[in-house]
Each structure stands twice: as C-alpha cells, then as structure tokens.
Amino acid sequence: MKTLILGAGAMGCLYGGLLKERGNDVILVDVSKPQVDEINRNGLVLETAEGKRNIKIKAKFAQEVTEQPDLIILFTKTIHSKSALSSLKAMIGPETMVLSLQNGLGNDEVIKEFVRTDKIIIGTTNFPSDLLKPGNVRSLGKGTTKIMSCNGEVTEKLKQVEMMLSDAGFNCIITEDVFVSIWEKVAFNAACNALTAASRLKLGDVGKTDEGKELARSIAKEVVSVANAKKIRANAENVIKLIELDFVEHAEHMPSMMQDVLGNRTTEIDFINGAVVKEAEKLGISVPVTNVLYKIVSMIQKNYENLIK
C-alpha cells in the first residue's frame, strides 16, 4: 500500500518512521525545507522505548510527488488541511483513501472536498511524540489508534489499514464509536494541550499541582457535556483517568500546542477549545473553564512579539 504522510511533524514522522521500519512503502510530505532536507540527507532519527535508530525514508515537497498513493495519512494542523490537500490534488486518485488522525473537530468535512465519503477514514491517536529538531523525533510511551470509515462501513481496505498500523506498533482498532473517541480526545487535548500551552509547563509539572489537576478535570467534564448534548456517548471519567495517567507516564511530554507556543507558531486552539466553545454556544451550554483557556491561548498567540522572555 503506497502511503503518503501529509504533515511530517512529530506525529507524522512517528507514524511514517515506524511504518517504513516494517517495510511499508512510505513517503513523508511536508512544507518545511529544514525538515525535508535533513531527513533526505541524514535519515529520520527516531527514539522510542525500544531505543534510538536512524530510519532511511524519503521526504518530499508536495510538488515533487509523482505517484498516486493508495493512502494519505493526514497529520497537518486542521487549519492547514485544505491547503495541504490542495497541494496534492493532482495525485489524489479515485481510489485514494484519506485517513485523518488529526486533533480537533470537523476534519472530515474538509476532506470531503477532495475525496468521496466512502474513501475517508477518521480516527484518533493518543501516542506521544516530540519533534526535538529537524529530522529528530522522540516518542516515549504507548497508545492506541482508533479508526472507522466515515460512512460507517467496515471494508476490506479499512481492515488493511488497521492491520498495517497494528503491525507497525500502533495498536489500531476499528470502532463504530469513533466519534466518541474523537470527542474524548478533544476533551483530553482541550485540557492537556491548552493547560501546557498557557502555562508553558510540561504535562507532569501541570499534574503535580492540585490546581492543574482540578482545571483538567473541569475541562474534561465541560467538553464531554457538550458531546453528550449532541447524543455522543463520551465519558468524562474515561478522559480524566487518561489525563491523570498521562500526568505520570508522559510527564516529560510537551504537547503540540505547547510546542507551537514555544515556537511562536499558530496553534490549533480554534479547532479544539474554540470549536467546543462554539458547539456549546449553539446548544446553550456553559463551558467557562474551557472558554477561559481558549481566550488565554488565543491572546498569547496574538502577542508572540510582546512576550517577556
């Protein structure tokens, strides 16, 4: 299965690297010249619990892709999904599948502009991954990948994707309740990503404090209340348990939103906390803690040049 990883950041490199290590035909696609050049020149340096190694994998810019892929795994920020897929539009064939393992809400709606609904796979992943520098990724910890066809059908191709990801160590599961997983992940990220981005503390440091734990629990409950109002059977206690586990097991992890703040980049706050706030407003639900974190991170990213170092 010819696979393109569209968005070769921390998560894209983790998935692309481990898939390539298992013998799959994989190409990383990104817009960052330092990232593409470093991977092509020196390989992808990947550090996991199994050790550090150098994986030889091709990295390209979108305009350099010359073959139609069987599968595109989308790992760009949601804000960049449309432009990223547009850059590959000529290479997206009628049978090309697109799998979104992105954060946030509404990713499937963007993908529908490029492929038929029956070619869209949506899912979640909770594997940690940090981009230490161009071409160098660290992922210390395990997780689960949950996927489902956007139209709800369990096809042979969907099963192939599940087997390929599981074989590479991503513990992939096909689940009919994928929107439960998506909303529970949004709840997790609305707490962990936004709290670390606003505080610029690692996960473990947030979790060491009673205040951090209390805020995380409050956000998880607020987000799940919105999902439940939409008839999605998300469970707040599941999210809280996962957050508390991550505070310990992934204590050194710096979530992507925190990394974006530290790098003065646009975050996904509008598609995580912001998207929850908008859904809550439509339903007449109050989500005060989620809303405050949304405004704080939004304020920070609008004032990078004014931050006191």
Image (cartoon, helix red, strand yellow):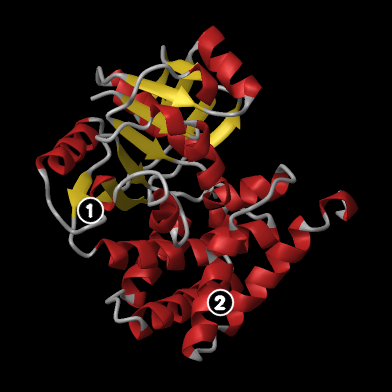
For label 2, the residue is 277
Q: Mark 2 or 1 closer to N-term?
A: 1
The answer to whether residue 61 shows anywhere in this view is no
Q: Is residue 281 above or below residue 265?
A: below
Look at the numbered disc 1 and give the secondary structure of its residue.
strand
User: Helix, strand or loop at disc 2?
Assistant: helix
Residue for point 43% across, 28% down: 90
Q: Residue at x 41, y 15 (%)?
A: 57
In this rendered view, identify the residue nearer to me: 25 or 112: 112
194 up-or-down from 251: above or below: below
Q: Which mark is residue 138?
A: none
How many angstroms separate mark 2 from mark 1 (CA)?
Answer: 26 Å
Q: Residue 179's x, y, as percent?
A: 30, 65
Identify which residue is drawn at 23% across, 25% down: 1
Does any portion of residue 37 appear in the rendered image?
A: yes
Left or right position of 157 against 13: left
- Residue receiving disc 1: 148
